Image: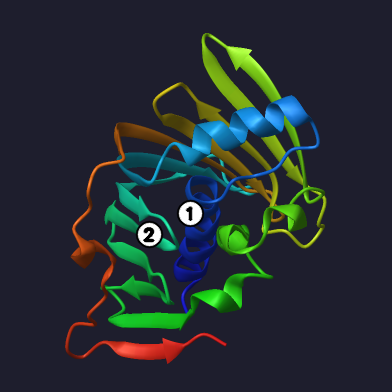
Amino acid sequence: MSERMINMRYLAFILSALLLAPWLSANEADKEQLIKSLEQFSTVSALFSQKTYAESSFEPEQLTGYFKVEKPLKFLWMVTAPYEQQVLSDGEMLWVYDPDLEQATYQAVDQQVQHSPAMILSEPRQTLSDQYQVLRVVIDDEQVYQLIPFDEDSVFTEMQMTLNDESIKKIVILDSLGQRTEIEFSQFSANQPIDPSAFQFNPPPGTDLFEQL
């Protein structure tokens, strides 16, 4: 499996977690504010511009594309440039498709519960109460949340999420490999119907399929 497929899978896990799951905070006021902000979205669509800075490189990897999310457990993360790649969950199966390599990996969504924050929404609220430290500041009428997992095996070491009253503006992710990923969103649309076909993956003829165990 290619390195970029692995990176895109775990990034999609994180983003879907943010949009689908009601994160909990050690601070009750911050907890309620974050829950309120995220639970207002039943569906989300947006364009994204992503930059990833590696420890060993001064030039970031830059990606653009779009994503769609529908509760529960359905999401599409589509990279359109400089190459194409698709990460999709239909609620039961998670697919990562690379057209250039003509291959796709798949696995059951529920297999990710204990390995990725993306599936936290399938866990009861009480199991989340002590998993994250959340700090909040207000900058120019925008809410900036810092999320730090207590679990040392988490796929990220720190996350910063910027929201206003109507949308998610930006996400910054620091991971255990020393990478910093910055994602900015535009044309944000919430609570609008999404065509069910957006979350259906039909492998093109000739695609090699690999089950991810």
Labels 1 and 2 touching (C-beta < 8 A): yes
How many numbered markers are drawn? 2
Q: Quadrant of residue 118?
A: bottom right
Q: Is 118 positioned to the left or the right of 183 in the image?
A: right
In this rendering, the answer to whether 94 lies above or below 81 is below
- In the image, residue 80 sits, relative to residue 153, either above or below, namely above
**Closest to the observer, 78 or 83:** 78
Q: Amino acid at mark 1?
A: Ser
The label number, if any, that marks residue 115 in the structure image: none
Q: Label 1 crowding class (10 Å Cα cut-off): few <14, some 14-19, many 20+?
A: many
Q: Position of residue 11 (x, y in %)?
A: 51, 56
Amino acid residing under circle 2: Phe
Q: Which residue is pictured at 22% across the width and 80% down the height?
A: 202
Image mark for residue 16: 1
Nearest the eye: 24 or 46: 24
Q: CA distance from mark 1 to mark 2?
A: 7 Å
Secondary structure at numbered mark 2: strand
To which residue does mark 2 refer? 75
Secondary-structure class at tag 1 = helix
Residue 3: percent from the left, percent from the top?
51, 70
| Image quadrant assignment for residue 210 | bottom left
Q: Residue at x 38, y 46 (%)?
A: 42
Coordinates of residue 1 in the picture (x, y in percent): 48, 80
Residue 82 visible in rendering: no
Give the quarter of the figure containing the C terminus.
bottom right
User: Could you tell me residue 105's position as x and y percent?
Assistant: 42, 81
